[in-house]
Structures are given as structure tokens and as C-alpha cells.
Image: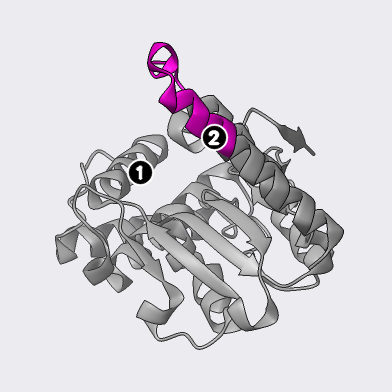
């Protein structure tokens, strides 16, 4: 055991001893010890979140892949990360991925928003095959008209809607109506990080994922560094998805 590990153990024992004494004193039992426990947890298991923030399609995912020398995050021309991705350290034999899906309600909201931006009058019912087929045809027509899926913002929105609908159909049995469903990679029968990351990197799957947590073996992460790839800062992000403002470095 290293000297540093012994110091952490001693610190934990000393703080816990003080807290026990605190609870034995009737006049002090009402004191909130949560902040002390939280600080202790951070001290004995320090993590430093490094958040990559920038505009859509700025190349954040591509840079992270290059730093980690792994093709973990989906990075393609014209693609914009709409999913929060967090990457932490793991030993070689404990590498894994945890996937959290958008709810059906959230997917429907995204579909409605994209339809409005594209000027479609139909309110999409994502559970009706004929509606989905019609929307896909309209999106394909827009992409063709614009000269390619990356040639204009309108074409990108059309492609985004197609990926969203495709991802919903492909993963319908894993998506809850209201709540966000979370799965380990074992529940998908993935045997290793590469297989799980390959699934998450597929555009249609990425479109219906709310959050991806990677546990990866790399020296950059070994000292408690946690890499966070965020949706573009010019996107409308829910407060619950952007509560990453304390104790982090923005790049």
C-alpha cells in the first residue's frame, strides 16, 4: 500500500472519529454533517472534471478520441454531439460503458422541434409507421435539394430528424415512455469496450442516447481526471444536463 493511500485512510479515520464524537454531544447533533462527508469523499477519491465545451461541430469529440487514442466518441463531418459523454478511468479488465436513453417523451419533443425548424406542418406521431415514412421522404427530399446532408443547416436538421426516428425504431424496446432507462453493456451482450463504443457511436443510436459513461484504461485518466464531452454550447440544454459549473476546467 502506498504512502498516499495510508494518508487517505488516516484522514478518513480521523474525520469519521470526529463526526462520531459530534453525534454523541446532544447540543451538536442537529448540525448538518453532509458538507463534511462530501468534502471527505472528494479528498479520499479526488476527481477532476475536464469539460470540453464549444459550438456544435467544433471537433470536440474528434479531439477527445485523439487524446485517448481510441475511437470512443462519434465524430463525423456534420455531426453534432447532442449527448453528454463522460469518460473515467478503469483498469484494463474493468473497462465498460453505461448507456442512458432519452425517454419517448423527450424524443417526441426533439422530433417536434426539428419538424418546426424544417417547416413541416405535421405534428409527428413517432409510433405511426406511415408518419415516419412520410417524414423520412420529406427529409431525403430536403437533403437532395440542398446538395447533401452537410451542405446547409436545413440539410443537417433533416438528417438529424432521420437519425432520431431511425434510432427510436431500432431501440424502441429499450426506451421508457417517461423515465430515462439506463443499461450496462452486459445487458446488451457486449463483451468489451470496443463493441459497446461501436454501438454508441452509430449515428442513429447516438441520437436517442441522453448520456454515455465510458470507463476506459488510459494514463490521462489514471489520476482522477474525468473527461466530459458536452452538447454544443449554442444548443438549448436542460439545466439538469449542464450542471457542470463547479470545480471544472473548460476547454
- Which residue of the protein is positioned furthest toward the top in this rendering? 27
User: What label sits on residue 110 in the rendered view?
Assistant: 1
User: What label sits on residue 197 in the rendered view?
Assistant: none
Q: Position of residue 48 (x, y in %)?
A: 73, 44
Q: Main secondary structure of the magenta part?
A: helix
- 11 to 169, vertically: above or below: above
The residue shown at (69%, 52%) is 9
Q: Nearer the viewer, residue 183 or 168?
A: 183
The residue shown at (62%, 33%) is 39
- Total marks shown come to 2
Q: Nearer the viewer, residue 136 or 182?
A: 182
Q: Position of residue 125 (x, y in %)?
A: 17, 51
* Residues tagged 1 and 2 counted as in contact (Cβ below 8 A): no
Quadrant location of residue 147? Answer: bottom right
Q: Position of residue 72 (x, y in %)?
A: 65, 69
Q: Position of residue 51 (x, y in %)?
A: 70, 42
- Does residue 128 appear to the left or right of 11 in the view shown? left
Q: Is residue 232 visible?
A: no
Sequence-wise, the earlier of marks 1 and 2 is 2
- 34 to 227, vertically: above or below: above
Query: Residue tagged by mark 2?
Result: 37
The residue shown at (64%, 52%) is 151
Q: Nearer the viewer, residue 218 or 104?
A: 218
Secondary structure under the numbered disc 1 in the rendered image: helix
Secondary structure under the numbered disc 2 in the rendered image: helix
Q: Quadrant of the N terminus?
A: bottom right
| Dot 2 alpha-carbon crowd within 10 angstroms: few under 14, some 14 to 19, many 20 or more | some
Residue 29 painted magenta: yes
| Dot 1 alpha-carbon crowd within 10 angstroms: few under 14, some 14 to 19, many 20 or more | some
Q: Give the magenta-colored segment's residue range.
A: 17-32
Amino acid at each position: 500500500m502506498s504512502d498516499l493511500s495510508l494518508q487517505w485512510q488516516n484522514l478518513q479515520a480521523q474525520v469519521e472519529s470526529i463526526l462520531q464524537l459530534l453525534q454523541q454531544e446532544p447540543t451538536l447533533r442537529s448540525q448538518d454533517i453532509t458538507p463534511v462527508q462530501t468534502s471527505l469523499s472528494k479528498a479520499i477519491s479526488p476527481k477532476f472534471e475536464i469539460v470540453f465545451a464549444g459550438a456544435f461541430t467544433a471537433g470536440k469529440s474528434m479531439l477527445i478520441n485523439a487524446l485517448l487514442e481510441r475511437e470512443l466518441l462519434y465524430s463525423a463531418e456534420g455531426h453534432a454531439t447532442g449527448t453528454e459523454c463522460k469518460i473515467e478511468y478503469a483498469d484494463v479488465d474493468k473497462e465498460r460503458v453505461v448507456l442512458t436513453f432519452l425517454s419517448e417523451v423527450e424524443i417526441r419533443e426533439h422530433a417536434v422541434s426539428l419538424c418546426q425548424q424544417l417547416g413541416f406542418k405535421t405534428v409527428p406521431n413517432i409510433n405511426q409507421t406511415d408518419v415516419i415514412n412520410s417524414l423520412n421522404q420529406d427529409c431525403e427530399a430536403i437533403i437532395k435539394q440542398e446538395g447533401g446532408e452537410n451542405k446547409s443547416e436545413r440539410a443537417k436538421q433533416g438528417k438529424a430528424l432521420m437519425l432520431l426516428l431511425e434510432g427510436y425504431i431500432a431501440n424502441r424496446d429499450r426506451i421508457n415512455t417517461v423515465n430515462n432507462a439506463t443499461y450496462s453493456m452486459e445487458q446488451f451482450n457486449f463483451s468489451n469496450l470496443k463493441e459497446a463504443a461501436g454501438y454508441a457511436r452509430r449515428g442513429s443510436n447516438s441520437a436517442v442516447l441522453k448520456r454515455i459513461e465510458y470507463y476506459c484504461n488510459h494514463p490521462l485518466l489514471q489520476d482522477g481526471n474525468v473527461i466530459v464531452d458536452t452538447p454544443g454550447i449554442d444548443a438549448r440544454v436542460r439545466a439538469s444536463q449542464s450542471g457542470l459549473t463547479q470545480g471544472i476546467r473548460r476547454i
